[in-house]
Amino acid sequence: MQSTMEDFDSEDCGVQDVGPQICGLVVQILETMAALLVRVRQKLLEMAILICVILLVFWVSLFLYGSFYYSFMPTANFITPVHFFYRTDCPSPHHSMCSFLVANVSLLKNGKHQVMTYGQPYQISLELEMPESPANQELGMFLVKMTPYSKAGQTVDASSRSAMLHYRSSLLQALGTVVFSPMLLTGASEQKQSVIVELYSEFKDDSYKPSIGAIIEIHSQHIQIYRAHLYIFAHFTGIRYLLYHFPLISALTGVLSNFTFLSLIIVLSFLQFNLSRRTTLGKAVMQQEENNEPDDLSDQSEPQDEDKATAHFLDPPTITENIDTMECNSAEMEESIPDMGVDESDSDFRELAEDEPICEPRDGEMILRHRHLSQGMLQSTDDIDKTYYRVGICSSC
């Protein structure tokens, strides 16, 4: 029966020993999970901030490239219809036209913005759609003149070019009429020619007198025209040539260049901020160390005082006096000893200590250090330390 009770007690002790370990393990797991969640949250926040910064830098790079393209690239081409007019109040009844065909063309986009940029060369051409009528075939050569003018009405430049219909013999005209007769009958095709007159090969606008319009004249009173258009094409060179003819590659290069430049600026600014912060912290630490130097000197002087006090307490009269005091108060010291749950009837726990009580000087009081625990108590209680100190105050008899 006694062995059964001992086994039961040992099992209880084992359960009690496992319980704290499990609790400690659970607490450790919870602390690890909490630290992991905090770290994951911090990483997610850093990733979100990084993504936002990258998107912001990308949109800024795109905006900078678009602004550069809009401001640097001039109008590539400009097409406008030309409407001719002439005078009909002729004094002679034999002529229905009293003047040459004249047209006033505006060189402003939407009536506000200039079409041509300063210093950029442009090719200006006039396209005339003329019927293959006997009047135009008998007309021969005719003269086309263009005179750009400024806002103040001043003439900027003048250009004159000659033109005529392409020659086609009567046999070729007859064969063409027979072959294209179905299309001619349905109206899908017409007997006409497009005559392109190049007025300027490289026209550069004057920055002091920008052109806002032009007067176009055709020096012929018998010419017949279906319609006319004015074409303005820009001759790009260098970077403008690459931007116009390779827009996708130029856009990728420009945006990536801006992105790299802005990223480099941000990284350098961040490093500069960290460097200045570390420098400030270092200066603060050095200043604090300098301020603590006098305190260290005073701390060095304090041990000397303590040594003197220790020597004073260790004088022979004082030690003798302390021993007497300890002998007088032995009964009080025994009462201050906790029984530690040990039965007084048990012979194993009645062993006395081999070490005698000793009074030591500490800060003006005498601290009593007691004996070792008995061997039986050490075997029954594993959680208690092998050396147990009891503290009392030594007083005189």
Image (spheres, grey):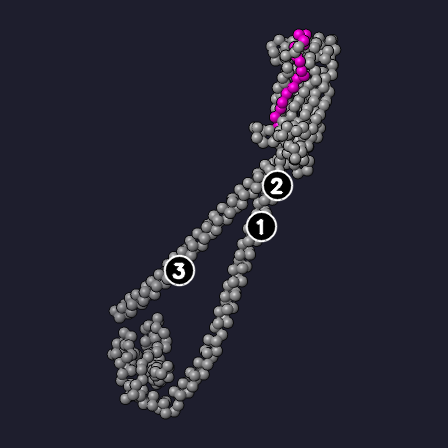
- Label 2 SS: helix
Measured from the top left, where is residue 51 in percent x and y? 50, 46
Q: Under tag 3, what secondary structure?
A: helix
Residue type at numbered disc 2: Thr
Residue 79 lies in quadrant: top right
Q: Position of residue 326 (x, y in %)?
A: 31, 87
> Which quadrant of the rendered structure holds the N terminus?
bottom left
Name the residue at 62% across, 8% down. 185
Taking the image as drawn, is residue 246 in sight?
Answer: no
**Magenta segment main secondary structure:** loop
N-terminal label among 2 and 3: 3
Q: Which residue is mark 3?
A: 28
Viewed as shown, does residue 238 lie left or right of 374? right
Q: Looking at the picture, how far across and down is residue 41, in whole percent?
A: 44, 52
Q: In the displayed structure, does residue 321 sit left or right of residue 277?
A: left
Relative to 320, residue 187 above or below: above
Frontmost residue, 349 versus 304:
304
Question: Which residue position holds label 2?
Answer: 253
Q: Amino acid at mark 3?
A: Gln
Which residue is at 55% across, 40% downward? 63
Residue that badge 1 annotates: 264
In which quadrant will I find the C terminus? bottom left
Mark 2 nearby-residue class (10 Å; few <14, some 14–19, many ≥20): few
Residues 298 and 336: in front is 298
What SS does tag 1 mark? helix
Stretch of the chain drawn in magenta:
92-107
Left or right of 54 on screen, residue 5 = left
Q: Is residue 343 left or right of residue 63?
A: left
